[in-house]
Image: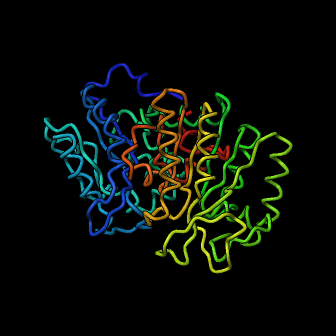
C-alpha cells in the first residue's frame, strides 16, 4: 500500500481527499468535533505541500437523496475556523461539475463537495460515477479508515482511475491495529463491552488465540453471568447465546487465554436509581446491573498493570448516568497511568468508549483512539476491508 509520504511533488496538484467527517449533527449544529480534529494533520500536510485539496465526505445516511439537515455546510464552516482559511463549498450537482469548474479563483486551494451520499451512485459503487469523480483530480488519497469497510464509489472504484495513496490517519490506524492483531507485544489484554455478544463473536474468536486476557464488562458481561447461572436480576442481556458463550470458554481453554468477568457490581432499581454495590450472590430479581464494583475494578487494574498492550472497546456500565460511570472512568485512568509511564501500548475504539475518554479529557493519553466503528470491528475480526484492498 502506497502512503502519502511517498509523493514527492504536490505543488499545484489537485488532490481528491476522501475523509470521514460524519459528525453528529442536531439542528445543523455539530455535537462532537473529534472526527474533524483528527483530519487536521492531513489537511495541513497537503496545504504545506501547496496542493489543491478537494474534500469528499458524507454525513449520516441520506439514502441517495438530498437532505438539507445532512449538509456538509456546518462542517465546512467549522473547518474554516480551525484552519483559519477560506474554504469553497460546492453545492452544485457533482454529476454536472466539470474539472474546469473547480478552483476558478487561483488563490483558492481547498474546497468541499456536498455530501457524497446525496448520490445513490456512491453507495452503488457506480463505476461511471467513480470515473467522473476521479476526473476532478490528479491524485487520490484515502484518509477515511472508518469508511474503508464500505464498497462505495469514492472509496473503492475511484482508485481504478487515479494514482492512489493512504493518508496519514488511515496509515496510523492500520499500524495501531496491527499492534493488537499481528505485531503484538505481550502480555496483551482486551477489555470488551457492548450489549450483544453475538455481534462481536467474530472478533472474540479472532482475538482469543492471540491474547492473554479477555475481560468482559458492561451488558456483555451480563451474558457471561447469566450463562454461569448467576442472578442478573432485570439487567440487559442477550437471549439464546449460551452456545456462543460455551464456544468462547472452550476456545479460551484450548488457547490458554484467561477470561475475566465481574466479581462484584453496582446495581440500581432503574436507570436513574441510586447506585448500590453488591456481590454477585446478593443481586436480586429487581436489580439492574449498571456498573462494575470495586473488587472488579481492582482486578482489571491489576491486569492492565501486568500488560504491555491493551485494546479497549466498550464501557463498563451505564456511563451516561454519572452514578454508574465510575468503572469506565477507572479503566480509562488505569490505562492512562500506564501510558504516561511509557509501559503500555493502548488502543481504544467505539463511540461510547471515546465518549468516556472525552469525559475525562484523556483523548491524547492513549497511543491510538479509533473513531472508526464498523471498520474498526471488521478489521479486528480479521476481515479484508474493500477500501484498504483497493489501495493495494
Q: Residue at x 46, y 27 (%)?
A: 3
In terms of depth relative to the viewer, which is nearer, 159 or 209? 209
For residue 227, above or below residue 352 = below
Residue 144 x %, y %: 44, 44
Q: Residue at x 45, y 53 (%)?
A: 356
For residue 368, above or below residue 69 = above
Q: Residue at x 77, y 42 (%)?
A: 257
In terms of depth relative to the viewer, which is nearer, 364 or 325? 325
Rendered-image quadrant of the N terminus: top right
Rendered-image quadrant of the C terminus: top right
Q: Residue at x 38, y 53 (%)?
A: 359
The furthest residue to the top: 8
Residue 10 x %, y %: 31, 25
- On the picture, is 260 further left or further right than 26? right
Q: Quadrant of residue 267?
A: bottom right
For residue 239, above or below residue 104 = below
Q: How many marks?
A: 0
Residue 367 x %, y %: 48, 34
The furthest residue to the bottom: 286
The figure's colour scheme reads: rainbow
In terms of depth relative to the viewer, which is nearer, 257 or 380? 257
Residue 149 x %, y %: 56, 49
Amino acid at each position: 500500500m502506497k502512503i502519502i509520504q511517498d509523493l514527492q511533488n504536490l505543488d499545484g496538484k489537485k488532490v481528491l481527499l476522501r475523509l470521514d467527517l460524519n459528525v453528529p449533527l442536531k439542528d445543523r449544529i455539530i455535537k462532537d468535533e473529534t472526527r474533524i480534529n483528527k483530519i487536521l494533520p492531513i489537511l495541513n500536510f497537503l496545504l504545506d505541500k501547496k496542493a489543491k485539496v478537494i474534500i469528499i465526505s458524507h454525513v449520516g445516511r441520506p439514502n441517495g437523496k438530498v437532505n438539507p439537515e445532512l449538509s456538509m455546510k456546518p462542517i465546512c464552516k467549522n473547518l474554516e475556523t480551525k484552519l483559519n482559511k477560506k474554504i469553497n463549498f460546492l453545492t452544485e450537482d457533482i454529476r454536472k461539475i466539470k474539472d474546469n469548474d473547480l478552483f476558478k479563483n487561483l488563490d483558492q486551494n481547498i474546497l468541499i463537495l456536498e455530501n457524497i451520499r446525496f448520490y445513490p451512485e456512491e453507495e452503488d459503487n457506480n463505476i461511471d460515477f467513480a470515473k467522473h469523480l476521479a476526473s476532478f483530480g490528479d491524485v487520490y488519497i484515502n484518509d477515511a479508515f472508518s469508511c474503508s469497510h464500505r464498497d462505495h464509489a469514492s472509496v473503492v472504484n475511484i482508485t481504478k482511475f487515479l494514482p492512489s495513496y493512504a493518508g496519514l490517519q488511515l496509515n496510523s490506524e492500520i499500524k495501531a491495529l496491527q499492534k493488537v492483531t499481528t505485531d503484538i507485544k505481550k502480555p496483551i489484554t482486551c477489555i470488551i463491552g457492548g450489549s450483544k455478544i453475538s455481534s462481536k463473536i467474530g472478533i472474540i474468536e479472532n482475538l482469543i488465540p492471540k491474547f492473554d486476557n479477555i475481560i468482559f464488562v458492561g451488558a456483555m458481561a451480563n451474558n457471561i453471568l447469566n450463562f454461569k447461572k448467576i442472578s442478573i436480576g432485570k439487567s440487559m442481556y442477550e437471549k439464546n447465546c449460551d452456545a456462543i458463550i460455551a464456544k468462547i470458554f472452550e476456545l479460551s481453554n484450548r488457547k490458554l487465554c484467561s477470561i475475566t468477568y465481574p466479581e462484584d457490581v453496582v446495581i440500581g432499581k432503574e436507570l436513574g436509581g441510586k447506585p448500590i454495590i453488591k456481590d454477585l450472590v446478593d443481586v436480586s430479581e429487581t436489580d439492574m446491573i449498571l456498573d462494575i464494583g470495586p473488587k472488579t475494578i481492582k482486578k482489571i487494574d491489576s491486569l492492565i498493570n501486568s500488560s504491555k498492550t491493551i485494546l479497549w472497546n466498550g464501557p463498563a456500565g451505564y456511563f451516561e448516568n454519572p452514578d454508574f460511570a465510575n468503572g469506565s472512568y477507572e479503566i480509562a485512568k488505569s490505562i492512562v497511568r500506564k501510558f504516561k509511564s511509557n509501559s503500555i501500548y493502548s488502543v481504544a475504539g467505539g463511540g461510547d468508549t471515546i465518549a468516556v475518554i472525552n469525559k475525562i479529557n484523556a483523548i491524547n493519553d492513549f497511543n491510538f483512539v479509533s473513531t472508526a466503528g464498523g471498520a474498526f470491528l471488521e478489521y479486528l475480526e480479521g476481515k479484508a476491508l474493500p477500501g484498504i484492498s483497493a489501495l493495494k
